[in-house]
């Protein structure tokens, strides 16, 4: 009975973000004939792929009533580590060892780096009771600092065709980043809806004390969720780096805000327990469409920021109004 | 348990600080502070590191302070520098007006300030200002731009951070030339925050609205590289000419490969080393410094690329 009710309200929320998106698209289609084309559709999807990867991880964290502010920095560090491994390998001074990496090896190395950074977030949060906001704020600075140290403040460029394919290639007419984002979303939907882990995540966000008393190993679930989000941020970093054919030391600045915006617009409650990955996808699409539409209309850069903020606020107000009716 | 863990944390922290701090704070030799607006952009990293390296070569201890584009943080740095008793400051400001008070504070405390690259709007606060002439540099790019496009066609402008005065100096210099030609039409003017990824995304969207453009002028090289990447992905790289500004490594390489049409070479090395040399002379007693030393921005194209390397001349 309770489970049924939850799914019901989730569907309604998803529906609402979808309506907001449709309204936005209709308005933009009337304002410019360049908006509603297949090319532009793919363009928007390609641009939001990174945010979808990050925001999906963020959704799982927010569902446990946590937050991750470090994703942008983790993205930058892992993107740089991936191409660093690919281009330079690892030299181990003791014993004059040199380890080279294949493309797949370097990517796995980058993902592992993200997983470990996320694991560290989760470890600090659960074992030392550091509030998620503070622990990940610290990681935001630490990971950015390590990115600067690792790149010495300079971009790493010219990464080769194979690697660039991840960012700018296409498979069956659909850009590779979009495939990656789609797989990530399906995986996260599967986890949240079909696995024990998913039920634990909702349970912890709904009522942590009750979840603990019912025997859920809260620390383990949380650490897993933060690690997963770290790995997804790393994946985003690999896509960004491949798209630009360059690892930028300042990549991913303020991406955490876009990810949180997508989660919130998608109707996931910041106090945890309520929301869905699908909602976040809608939220990311709304942000992407807005970014794209404002440029298509050549709106002044000053006004763009005002409009974006306004739309985020409006989307959440509509969402809350629906919740109250519900 | 609690006090114990705090104790351990403090010990670890102290160990780390001690490790970071090896062989600075040596007594005896004089010290020069390098305060830079940001270290999130390779150009400024180069500026700061060159200034510090030159100061060290002249026999000083040098420390770099990163203001993270935040004038308030810059103010904190100046206070710390004054308290710590540095002998000179090599300074790259966050804000032409907002930074004046900081410089004045140092001057009042008897510490000379030498501005690099970015101007501050005061005629007597800094001992000397060694400045990059963004406006004139953009004028020469504008001239080359009109010539390359044969005075007609549609173009796009990507602006830097809209709150930054360099953004507008470059934009105004460029338009002072290009706007005189009726055949050149700007179809879009958007900001990409001096950021490579943002420039690529903005350019992708602009290409949807305006598939047939002839040129792109970007307020820095990072954006030029991003715009170029978007053009490559759209299969239009050979039809659209890209112009940047800075003289960063990627852009210099790309001009050599005929991917980017031109950039405005600034000379961070010249500015940083002049500032460090001035500071050295000040400490040794010289007082008559020129208030402003303009460092010209030079146009780099495929024709003269062989004379240039990243951030300077061969």
Image (cartoon, grey):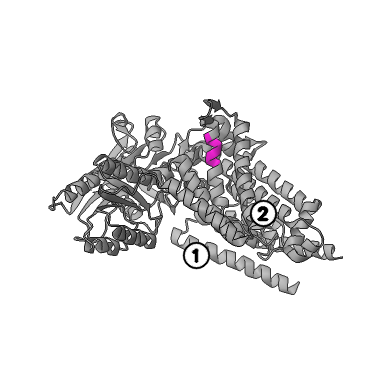
At a point 30% along the width and 61% down the height, the residue shown is B83
Q: Quadrant of residue A278?
A: bottom right
Give yes or no for contact between labels 1 and 2 (Cβ–Cβ under 8 Å).
no
Near-viewer residue (A220 or B121):
A220
Residue bearing mark 1 = A306
Please state the extent of the stretch shown in magenta in the rendering.
Answer: A79-84
Q: Earlier in the sequence, mark 1 or mark 2?
A: 2
The quarter of the picture where the N terminus of chain A appears is bottom right
Which SS class for mark 1? helix
* Disc 1 chain ID: A
Q: Quadrant of residue B122?
A: bottom left
At a point 67% along the width and 66% down the height, the residue shown is A271
Residue A207 on image: x %, y %: 75, 66
Residue bearing mark 2 = A281
Near-viewer residue (A2 or B239):
A2
Q: Quadrant of residue A205?
A: bottom right
Residue A98 on image: x %, y %: 54, 26
From the viewer's perspective, tell me whether residue B103 is left or right of residue A22: left
* Disc 2 chain ID: A
**Residue A80 drawn in magenta:** yes
Task: Name the residue furthest bottom.
Answer: A325
Which SS class for mark 2? helix
From the viewer's perspective, tell me whether residue B178 is left or right of residue A81: left
Near-viewer residue (A170 or A201):
A201
Task: Name the residue furthest right.
Answer: A1
At a point 24% along the width and 41% down the height, the residue shown is B58
Residue A318 on image: x %, y %: 65, 69
- Our reading of the magenta stretch's main secondary structure is helix
Q: CA distance from mark 1 to mark 2?
A: 23 Å
Near-viewer residue (B20 or A285):
B20
Residue A212 on image: x %, y %: 77, 61
At a point 37% along the width and 39% down the height, the residue shown is B248
């Amino acid at each position: 009975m309770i489970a049924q009710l939850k799914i019901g309200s989730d569907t309604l929320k998803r529906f609402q973000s979808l309506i907001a998106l449709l309204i936005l698209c209709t308005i933009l289609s009337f304002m410019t004939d360049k908006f509603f084309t297949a090319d532009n559709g793919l363009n928007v999807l390609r641009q939001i792929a990174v945010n979808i990867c990050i925001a999906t991880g963020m959704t799982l964290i927010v569902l446990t009533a946590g937050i991750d502010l470090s994703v942008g920095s983790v993205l930058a560090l892992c993107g740089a580590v991936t191409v660093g491994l690919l281009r330079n390998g690892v030299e181990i001074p003791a014993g004059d060892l040199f380890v080279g990496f294949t493309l797949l090896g370097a990517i796995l190395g980058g993902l592992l780096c993200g997983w470990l950074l996320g694991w560290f977030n989760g470890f600090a949060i659960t074992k030392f009771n550091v509030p998620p906001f503070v622990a990940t704020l610290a990681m935001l600075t630490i990971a950015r600092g390590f990115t600067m140290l690792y790149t010495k403040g300079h971009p790493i460029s010219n990464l080769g065709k194979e690697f660039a394919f991840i960012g700018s290639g296409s498979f069956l007419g659909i850009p590779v980043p979009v495939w990656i984002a789609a797989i990530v979303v399906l995986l996260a939907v599967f986890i949240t809806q079909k696995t024990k882990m998913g039920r634990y995540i909702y349970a912890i966000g709904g009522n942590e004390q009750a979840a603990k008393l019912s025997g859920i190993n809260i620390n383990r679930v949380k650490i897993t969720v933060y690690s997963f989000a770290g790995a997804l941020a790393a994946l985003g970093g690999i896509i960004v780096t491949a798209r630009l054919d360059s690892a930028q030391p300042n990549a991913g600045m303020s991406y955490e805000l876009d990810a949180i915006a997508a989660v919130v617009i998608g109707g996931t409650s910041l106090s945890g327990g309520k929301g869905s990955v699908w909602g976040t996808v809608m939220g990311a699409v709304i942000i992407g469409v807005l970014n794209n539409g404002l440029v298509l209309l050549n709106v002044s850069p000053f006004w763009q920021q005002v409009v974006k903020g306004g739309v985020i606020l409006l989307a959440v107000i509509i969402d809350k109004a629906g919740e109250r009716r519900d | 348990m609690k006090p114990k863990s705090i104790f351990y944390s403090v010990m670890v922290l102290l160990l780390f600080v001690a490790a970071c701090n090896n062989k600075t704070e040596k007594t005896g030799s004089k010290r020069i502070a390098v305060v830079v607006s940001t270290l999130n952009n390779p150009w400024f990293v180069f500026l700061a590191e060159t200034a510090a390296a030159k100061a060290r070569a002249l026999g000083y201890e040098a420390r770099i302070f990163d203001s993270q584009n935040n004038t308030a943080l810059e103010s904190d740095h100046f206070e710390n520098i004054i308290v710590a008793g540095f002998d000179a400051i090599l300074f790259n400001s966050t804000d032409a007006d907002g930074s004046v008070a900081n410089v004045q504070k140092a001057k009042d405390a008897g510490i000379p300030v030498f501005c690099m690259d970015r101007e501050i709007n005061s005629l007597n606060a800094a001992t000397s200002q060694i400045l990059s002439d963004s406006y004139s540099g953009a004028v020469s790019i504008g001239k080359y731009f009109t010539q390359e496009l044969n005075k007609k066609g549609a173009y796009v402008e990507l602006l830097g951070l809209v709150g930054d005065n360099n953004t507008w100096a470059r934009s105004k210099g460029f338009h002072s030339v290009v706007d005189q030609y009726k055949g050149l039409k700007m179809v879009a003017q958007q900001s990409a925050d001096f950021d490579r990824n943002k420039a690529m995304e903005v350019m992708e969207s602009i290409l949807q609205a305006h598939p047939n453009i002839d040129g792109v002028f970007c307020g820095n090289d990072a954006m030029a590289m991003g715009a170029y990447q978007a053009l490559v992905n759209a299969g239009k790289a050979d039809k659209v000419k890209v112009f940047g500004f800075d003289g960063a490594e990627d852009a210099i390489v790309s001009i050599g490969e005929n991917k980017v049409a031109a950039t405005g070479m600034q000379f961070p090395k010249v500015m940083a080393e002049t500032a460090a040399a001035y500071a050295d002379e000040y400490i040794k007693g010289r007082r008559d410094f020129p208030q402003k030393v303009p460092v010209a921005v030079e146009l780099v194209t495929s024709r003269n690329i062989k004379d240039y390397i990243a951030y300077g001349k061969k």
